[in-house]
Structures are given as structure tokens and as C-alpha cells.
Image (cartoon, rainbow, N blue to C red):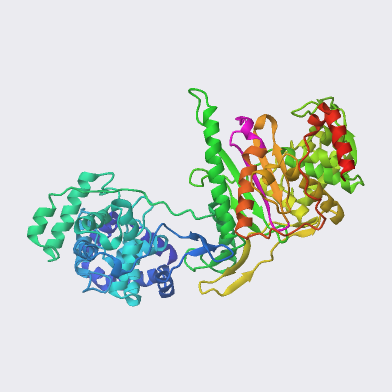
Amino acid sequence: MKLAFESAASYTAGQWRQFIALIRRHPVRAALTLPALVILYVLLLIPFTPGIGDLRKAKSELPSVLLASDGTVLAEYRRVNRKWVTLDTISPHVINALIATEDRRFYDHHGIDLRRTAGAAFSTLTGDLQGGSTITQQLARNLYPDEIGRATSITRKVKEAITALKIEAVYSKREILETYLNTVPFLYNAFGIEMAARTYFDTSADKLDVLESATLIGMLKGTSYYNPVQNPERSLQRRNLVLAQMVSEGKLDKARYDALIKRPINLDFERQIEPLGAAPHIAQHLRKWLIGWADRHGYDIHADGLKLRTTIDAQIQKLANQAVARQLAQLQKLADGRRKAGQERAYLQAGFVAIDPRSGAVRAWVGSRDYAEEQFDHVSQARRQPGSTFKPFVYGAAFMQGLSPSFALTDQPVSIRSPDGQVWAPSDATPPTGLPMTLRDGLAYSKNTITAQLMQKVGPASVGKLAQALGVRQSKLDLVPSLALGTSPVTLLEMVTAYGTLANSGNYMAPGLVAQVEDRSGRILEVFAPAGERGLAMPRQDALALVDVMRGVVDRGTGIAIRQRYGIQADVAAKTGTTQDNTDGWFIMMSPQLVAGARVGFNDNSVTMGEWGQGARSALPMVGEVFQQALRARLLDRNAEFDIPRPRPQPPPPPPEQRRDDPLGDLVNDIIGKIFR
């Protein structure tokens, strides 16, 4: 029987005409068996149509929302781009046009207009394909396209009719009209009358006039064929036909009709883009996560109104968005200024992420300069060489092997031969001084020659192992001497996580975004720990020693703009990073309560930045601005201190190469200092 039913279900109108011809040849036999077959056919189809419970659920469909930690809405997970409006807030011209054109006996039937259905069936069987669907039947198709289908077949029409009868049993006529007008598609990703009004006429559903209403209702016969943007002449003819139907039904005065049909269609067209929200990359990332969670627990993220509360701080996220947009706008001007005639414009991109080191909670995440143009995530997907931001791992490995920040190496040329015979000879922007330099100064001034020598002492394997323990856990590290200068590509998220481990006294906390999931009424369904994987990655005393050394970067080294330009006097430590030829600029800064990092560069890493591409000039301003504004707004405690005493504030000394050129001045300064100490 199932095979026979499936065969019948696939019949087209032409096949059914052949069946009717067979009935004509045997009328008596058909008269006895046909009613029973029809009843059996309908009964077999009932289980394949949506149930009453499904219909009631569709009536109360509510999209899930993504929330910041304070309840601010970051995104909505809608099935389609639709804004639901009540029937009272829809122009009466729309309703009059709809009923006059699509279903003039709407208030007299119970889902199926038998007179219209019989007429449409007869026309179809004679070769003139016509539709006889009521508004309720069309609603059934809109709500359940998968269950009912779109095929031109008797089976689809019967399933549509059965579903329409069920809808009439659940919905009032007003509810049917409201649901229909909120679910019907109008092209250009506009679903429902409100989005259609905004898209085609830049107005709202309650302000649509009779001409605008007739135009939109006219599209329902064929949203593409009668589209006023694509086919304005057809749309005009169809609009006037709708107006004529309204006259026929007594909903429009004949004299007014005669005047209206002479008017053109005055479109004010603009595609309605779904709002991206404050954190679109996070929204996209967590959408996949929420779908998996909902599937396991029997929920629908588009209908059940789940609330996914994240660890994002709405205020810090806003600051991050502003800082990235402002800095990239300025840098893009510099990039455009370097563009040669005829050269294609290259767009700078950036990533920014901030984490609470105490818990691993992600507080802000900016994946690109504009999600609408760049969905690629420069926080978690982009793998680029980190440059000198990788150097702290070399110094950390040295401290773990017993060296102290005061240990000195000579600032001299370095040449390292690898096992395969290749020679690596790193250099700095300024010539070597030939003078001893402590590890503290070597990191503060980001000296490549000092770092390379230190790498020889501790070994690439130790450095790679420490970097992985701290948080660089997804990217593969090449355990070669040049790793010391950040030659292995990593993600910004990994680097900020590793710095977060340092700020947390060596305790690793996996970055986390999800705090809890709630139902539509706010009842908590599941709570998630602040961090997943955790553990001691580095001895506490060594981690604190490294943090103390990295304070020097902002106190007197390459990141001194944090103190001088942004006026940040809180206890912070940081590291700048610039890759070869200024391809990428990095800056990561940590405080006891927040660790934030930024990276700037072109998507094509063969395109380089100018001198302004150095991390201290390209990436530092983003982090500096966020910290500055967060401290001003008291989002961070300016009195928070790392668990190691800060050195007494002192004016920054001149760089080592300047001290070498003025030995007499250094001697005088030392004598004066001893006299007045």
C-alpha cells in the first residue's frame, strides 16, 4: 500500500487527466469505488501534514538572542529577515487589497473555498493551469514549505488543504491574516509586510497608502515576475488590476480608482540588511555552537526564544569597535597614499580581542574592520607571524632555567648556523653597541641580538613547550632558532590567551565565551564554567618575574606611548611586535584584570605597510584607547596591581645606542646621582 500511495502522490496534473479518462470508460465502477478511494487517499495523507501542536508552536515562534553579560542584545538568530507586526499596525489598504485579490470569500469559508477549488481544478484539467488556494492555504505553504512542498501535484494540493483546515481550527481569521502578512516573502531577503514596506517604499506597514498596498499585494502572484524593481511595467499593470478588484469588492471608489491608475509606481527602494549587532564575529561563531546545543536538548534556535548569555562586556566591546574603526580609518589613508598609479587598492584589516586573565572570560572580540565586507575572523582564523610579541616566551624559558632579569649578554652581531647549513643572522634597526645588556633591557627595547643569543642558551624546544603551555595550542610551531623572533604563524587569540596566563601568575585559563543558556522566560537551562581547561603552565615566581620585566616595555621601551600618549598610569605590562618589512603590526598589553591584543595587516601578506606599520604605531593605539577609556569609565580598577612590587616611577633613560655615544655625559650623570642620592 505504501508503494501505491507514494506512486499516487507523485502524479502530475497530466497523469490525473489520464486517470479521469479511464473513469469515463467505466462510470458505474468508478461511481462505486471513487469516493472510498478519495477518502482513503486523504486519510493516508493526514499523517504527512503538520500536526496541531506544530501549528500552535509556529504561532508563538520567537528567535533566540545572544546577550552580553549585562543583558544587552548582541544578535538575534532569526529564521528569516522579518519583523513581526500586529494586524492593528498594518494599513487597512493592505488587508482590503489582499482579500479582494487573493480570497474574496475569506470570511465565509473554513480554510477551503470549494467553489474556487472546483473551478481551478476544472480549468487545470482542461489545460489552463490555475491556482485556487485560499489565504489560509497559502499560509500553510509559507509556514510549512518542507512538509507540503511546492510541486504542481494533486498530493501537494490535498496536503495544503488538510493543513489549511487545521489552521482554521487553531487560528481566528484575524490571526490568519496577521500570520500570513508576516510570513509572505517579497524578495531581496524581505519577509513579511513590514520588511516589504521598508524595502520598496522606505516606510512602515501602518503607513502604506492604497497604491503602495496594491503594488505589494500584486507581487504575491509572482514576486519576481511582478517585481516593481525588475519589471516595473508588469508591476504597474498588476497594481491596477488589484485596484480594480478593490473597486469590485466595494473597497475603493470608482472615481478615485480612475485617478489612481494614472499614477506611476513611486519606489524608494533599499535592501534591508539584517543588523549585524555589536559583535558579529562572535554571533556567527556562537550560532554554530548554539545549534549543536539546541539539537542535543531538543530546541529550535529560530523558534524557541533561547537566550545565550555570553561573557562579553558590552561597554568594552563598544570601546573596541570604536578603537578599531578609528585607527584603521587613519591607517587606510596612509596606505592609500603609498598606492602607485594603477595599483589596485588594498584594504587593511585588524583583529582585536580582550580577555579577563582571572577566568578566561572573553570581554571583547572584533574580528575585522567591517563584518559586512569581511567575514574572515582575524582573531581566531588568521594565522600570521607574531614578530616580537613572541619574545617573552624566550625570556620566560630562560627564567625557568635559572637566569635572572639582571643577567647580561653582549649586544653584538649574531650568526647562527642551522643543522642544514643555513645561517641565521638577525639584526636590529640600530647597530650593535658592543656593550653588556641585561635581559630586562633586552626585552624592554626588543633587541633581536640579545633575544637570539638567549634562544641559543635555552633552546627552541624549551621555548616552544612554554609557548604551548601558556596558550599557543592550535598552531604548529617550528622549533628552530628563528622562532625566538616569532617566525611561526599563530592566531591573535592564542597570543592573548598566553599573555593572559602570564597575567594570571602562570595559571592557564582556556578562553570562554558562553556563560549560560536560558529559555524564553529567563529560566536557566545550563550554566558553563568560566573556563574549560585550566592548569599551571609556568611557575608563579617565573611568570611574575616576566611580567615585571614586561612592565619596562611601557615604562621606558617600545611601548612607552601607553604612558606618554594615553596617560595610563595603572600597573600594565606589554610587548610590541613588527614582522619583516612591516607586514604585520602587533601589540598586546596586560593588567591584572584585562589582557587585550591587536594585530594590523593586509590580507595578502605580500603587501607591506610603511614605517607606520610598526606595532607601536599601528596596533598599540587600539589597545591603548580601549584601556584608557575603560579606566576612565571605571570598568577597570586603576589601583589593581600584579603580585610583584612595581619599580619606583622614573623618567625613561635614553636608548642604549644613545648612551654609547655620550660616555662623558653618562659619567657626569652617575656622579650627580651619587651626590644627591
Does residue 586 appear in the picture of this structure? yes
- Percent x, y for residue 604? 59, 33
Does residue 418 appear in the picture of this structure? no
Of residues 422 and 52, the one drawn nearer to the viewer in this rendering? 422
Find the magenta span and give its range.
592-614
In this picture, residue 334 sits left or right of residue 211 = right
Magenta stretch holds residue 48: no
The quadrant holding residue 541 is bottom right
Of residues 108 and 389, the one drawn nearer to the viewer in this rendering? 389
Instruction: Say above or below: 66 vs 382.
Output: below
Residue at the outermost top position = 341
Instruction: Say above or below: 670 vs 527.
Output: above
The residue depicted at 58 percent of the width and 51 percent of the height is: 320
- Percent x, y for residue 435? 87, 30
Q: For the N terminus, which image quadrant? A: bottom left
- Percent x, y for residue 16? 28, 59
Residue at the outermost front position = 675
